[in-house]
Image (tube, helix red, strand yellow):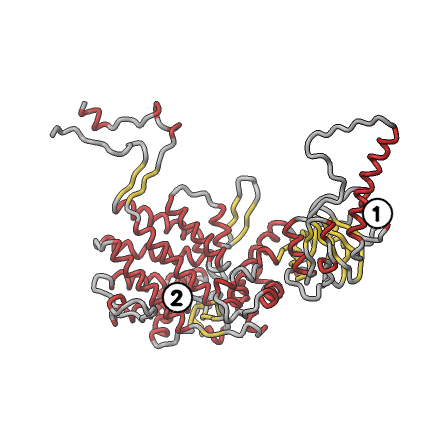
Amino acid sequence: MSGTPVFVMNTAPERQSGRKAQISNITAAKTVADVIRTCLGPKSMLKMILDPMGGILLTNDGNAILREIDVAHPAAKNMIELSRTQDEECGDGTTSVIVLAASILASSLSQLERDIHPVVIISAYNKALREALSIIDRVAIPVNVNDEEQMLGIVKGALGTKFVSRWSGLMCQLALDAVRIVAQNNQLSSPTTQTSSAPLSATPIIDIKRHARVEKIPGGSIEESRVIRGIMLNKDITHPGMRRRIQKPRIVLLDCPLEYKKGESQTNMEFSKEGDWARAQEVEEEVVKAMVEAVCQVGCDLVLTEKGISDLAQHHFLKHNVSCIRRVRKSDNNRIALAVGATIVNRVEDLRESDVGTGCEEMRVEKIGDEYFTLLAPCTSPRACTILLRGPSKDILNEVDRNLQDAMSVARNVMMDPRLVPGGGAIEMAVGVGLTQAAKRGTITASQGREGAKENTITGVETGPFLAVAEAMEVIPRTLVQNAGGNAIRVLTELRAKHTSSMSTFGVNGDTGKIVDMKEYGLWESASVKVQILKTAVEAARMLLRVDDVVQAVRKEREQGGGAPMPEEMMEAQ
């Protein structure tokens, strides 16, 4: 064998392998967490981000901040994805999940330096997650979703850390009212109740994204915001002579144009007599008139269509004293159908009496700000609603909208999984103390029947990584104390002592940085949010620990002369 080195991989890509790759990933995760660590808790700081288009983003929402940050490191991108997942699943806990995942990864660094294999660390993390979930099940208390005061308290806990905390009473009421209106959809469309159906089957039913629209209108004060038990459209009626206020309107929803259908390709018509031309135009008018007559024969007062309405059709509608609105968005049309009990019809010939919506008390056109809006409200039994937000500027309205979406998500989570855990870092400290006690015992609680006794024991090598997760859990109360300007070491020692004495409801008051009993303080959070945070954070740590090689491919145009540059060793060998 000659001493010539053999290069299998292209040397142009940057490559990190082994311990170096793992340390690089952990450092990247910690860097992302450091960006938003100060955004946790009621004393959180705001971040001002200038986007590429020149717009300003002013927020302390973890997901909104990370979404705007452009990162190059693959592990950092993976961490940002965690925040997006948490936002889609729960709406709350976007900052906590990043901070916790980075803390778990940082605690694994000392384990790797002791030459514990990543697979052993991951096995310990799996057991720690199972034990943590069983601790949450033990600490969680049931909640009555029909108790207005209790529900408002839960939503207020989620909004306490946000920009709108000054108006938290109003925002909590808005979020709860909107979710309750959309949740009625569950009883109307499904024979099973929420308690008997599994959370997975209930997820698409309380669909706040599609059925609760937020209409942001700059101007006025935030106190003027309200929930409309019906639909609000940024549209005016098409003809000035039509009625702008109708009591108990009969509403028809269409998905077809009310105008003469032109030929699809280029059409030529030849006329031999002068009267034929006039007759051809009359036919066009007759077709439009027949369409209008077909719509009006069901006795409607208001027609909304997703397509256009010709001037002639408007004229005939005016004769029948029918108001009409054209080019309504598909999503708006679907929500109107849910609110007023109408059916969207694709052909006017198919229109029947049962398709007419009669669930609206009043239709009126109002001028709000500089624009005209059509309000179909109040509705008798709406399954969709509109939230009208007023505020001094567009940036503030965007932030209020983000906070309101979080509040609605929290209310939805509690309705789907009505269990609560104490907030203010209490549940994290309870999990941390519980994991420490499990490590001393050497066994974890058997949470799933299919796993045997062997799976529930913590072997000698696994004890270190298992305790590392327990230590990492304390990052949430520690950050809350630090952001409130308290003494983290003293407060955490006191809090740990309380939890060791089985006082699992004690947490950190985010305003003062002191410890307080969350039962008396009244800060409760949805158990489903905490479960999702734990699962996502541990899963991310497990995935990044499995990585032992990072290869960054280089694009062709960057390569010199179409190929990779020859390494110095090969040049010397020649």
Q: Quadrant of the C terminus?
A: top left
- Give the labeled residue for mark 1: 316
Q: Quadrant of residue 568?
A: top left
Name the residue nearer the viewer: 573 or 470: 573
At numbered mark 1, what does the secondary structure look like: helix, strand or loop?
A: helix
Q: Earlier in the sequence, mark 2 or mark 1?
A: 1
Tell whether label 1 touches label 2 (CB within 8 Å). no
Any part of residue 112 in sight: yes
Q: Is residue 498 above or below residue 236?
A: below
Q: Is residue 537 above or below residue 567?
A: below
Q: Is residue 323 above or below residue 205?
A: above
> Hey, what amino acid is under mark 2?
Glu
Residue to which mark 2 is pinned: 428
| Side of 310 where 520 appears, left or right | left
Image position of 464 with respect to 31: above or below:
below
Horizontal placement of 3 versus 128: left or right? left
- The residue drawn where x is 22% and y is 24% is 571
> Residue 44: x and y, percent?
49, 58
Towards the viewer: 227 or 471: 227
Closer to the camera, 83 or 42?
Answer: 83
Q: Residue at x 29, y 56 (%)?
A: 108
Drawn side of residue 394 relative to residue 141, left or right = right
178 or 158, nearer to the observer: 178
Q: Position of residue 423 (x, y in %)?
A: 46, 68
